[in-house]
Image (cartoon, grey):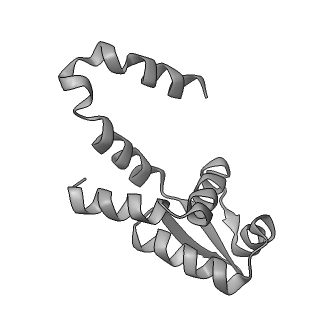
Amino acid sequence: MESDEALAALAALSHPTRLDTFRHLVKAEPEGLSTGQLVAASALSQSTLSTHLAVLVAAELVVAEKRGRQMIQRANIDRLRALMLFLAKDCCQGRAELCEPLAAELACC
């Protein structure tokens, strides 16, 4: 991941609604959630949520798939992984033992 891609992803996640939506989608993997389910969970109008989803899609954090008559939104776990690796790649100046607590905390969840 390049710096400009990381900045786009971080900017997309910097809004509370988008961050909550993305976290909700991560929890729903691998099935994803319909746009209607996301609207119900957020208490936002469909048009407002769609605007937020468009930002997440543009940052490649969310992928929309059509299933029958529904649009299913899914978190792009590969993109999340790339962002996390970008942020932690140079962690602690290459001293992996200093990042082990972070890795252990992620493993337990």
Q: Residue at x 65, y 59 (%)?
A: 32
Left or right: where does residue 61 sit relative to residue 37?
left
- On the image, the x and y values in percent for residue 16 come to 59, 61
Q: Nearer the viewer, residue 32 or 1?
A: 1
- On the image, the x and y values in percent for residue 102 come to 44, 24
Left or right: where does residue 32 sit relative to residue 42?
left
Q: Nearer the viewer, residue 71 or 102?
A: 102
Q: Residue at x 65, y 77 (%)?
A: 49
25 lies above or below 64: above
Left or right: where does residue 91 sit relative to residue 40?
left
41 lies above or below 51: above
11 lies above or below 1: below
Q: Nearer the viewer, residue 7 or 31?
A: 7
Please give the count of numbered marks on the rendered protein: 0
Q: Residue at x 41, y 66 (%)?
A: 60
Name the residue furthest bottom: 47
Q: Quadrant of the C terminus?
A: top right
- On the image, the x and y values in percent for residue 72 come to 65, 70
Which of the 4 image quadrants contains residue 41? bottom right
Q: Residue at x 57, y 65 (%)?
A: 18
